[in-house]
Image (cartoon, grey):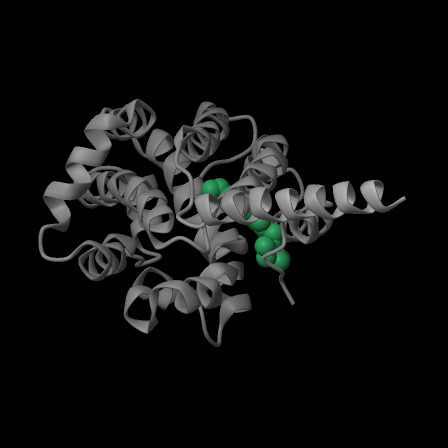
Amino acid sequence: MHSNDPHEIAKEDDGEAFDKTTSKGRENGLFQACMKSIRGAHVTSNRLRAGLVLAGLFTDKSIYREVLSMFYVVTKELEEKLDTLKVSDEICQKIASLDYNFSKGYEKDMAVLYGDDWETIIEDLIQKNKVARYYREMVRNMDSGTQLAGAAFVLWGALIIGGGAVAMPRVKNLCGKDAINVFKDVTGPGREERRNNFVALWDSLASPGSSEFEEIVTFSQECMRCNNNIFTSLQRSPWWLNYFITAGVGIGAICIVILQRRMIKS
Ligand code: HEM
């Protein structure tokens, strides 16, 4: 059972589940190496996410859709490049053979959350966010499977083997059943099989000691840093914050009046 409470999330974040999944990869293979390379950033991302939960990620639709739109533009770039390079690059071919296309799900969700004009609205948002622009540009300039593997590891991996899919019920509560298309291929029966396929394929991408192996690990680490930067770049207050502050001030004022009356009486 997963909680929305940031303190509970911090408790969950003891790295145990992450390490257990890491051990599913071949000893010293690529999967383990990529997981180890993002472990530190993953602890940070859990904390950032805990902060965002507090800031309204799952209680304010406009915050959720903004985060989603940033991951969308980068994922779209990744999936287009995989599609183009798979004809000549074996690593891209293997990754593409997993047959995920998260962009389609993201696009359906964006249309529900922003309306027909979603593409223009998102592009405006991205233009205002230099972290998202940098990340998208970085993926756009990638020209080999070893580089794209780094982006696929953190953008697909978070959903296929990570805690991403666990967010689905919370998103459903907030945005409704029509806005959870991005989770379609990673929820429901077969999660273990999907994870095992991902892990096995990852270990087959490059052998330990090869330059491809090192490059994939380096790019995974760099892309995970960008994932975290997306969370920190979000400077927004949830809609309920003003009510919260007003209520807090109101309660504070009542307490002061009660205290003053008590002091006068005594
Ligand atoms: C955007 C970046 C990410 C965030 C904010 C994030 C956040 C989280 C959180 C909060 C959990 C705790 C579980 C929960 O709430 O249910 C979790 C679990 C996990 N994450 Fe991530 N994660 C991210 C990316 C990744 C990536 C790139 C991977 C690996 C490719 C990954 C692998 C895992 C694994 C293996 C678990 C344990 C899942 C389980 O067995 O329960 N995460 N993540």
Identify which residue is drawn at 12% across, 46% down.
119
Figure check: 169 above or below 100: below
Query: Residue 194 at x, y = what percent?
Result: 47, 64
Tell me if I can see residue 33 in this picture: no
Front residue of this view, candidates 262 and 134: 262
Q: Could you say where residue 57 lies in the image, as x and y percent from the top left?
A: 45, 49
Q: Is residue 264 left or right of residue 49?
A: right
Disc tally is 0
Residue 66, given in percent of the width and then of the height, sits at 31, 44
Q: Among all residues in the image, which is located at the extreme right?
A: 266
Q: In the current view of this chain or complex, which residue is farthest to the front?
A: 265
Q: Is residue 83 above or below residue 61?
A: above
Is 231 displayed left or right of 178 in the figure? Answer: right
Q: Quadrant of the N terminus?
A: bottom right
Judging depth in this view, the residue of 249 and 111 nearest the camera is 249
Q: Quadrant of the C terminus?
A: top right
Which of 218 and 236 lies nearest the eye of the viewer? 236
- Judged left or right of residue 204, residue 73 is left
Residue 76 lies in quadrant: top left
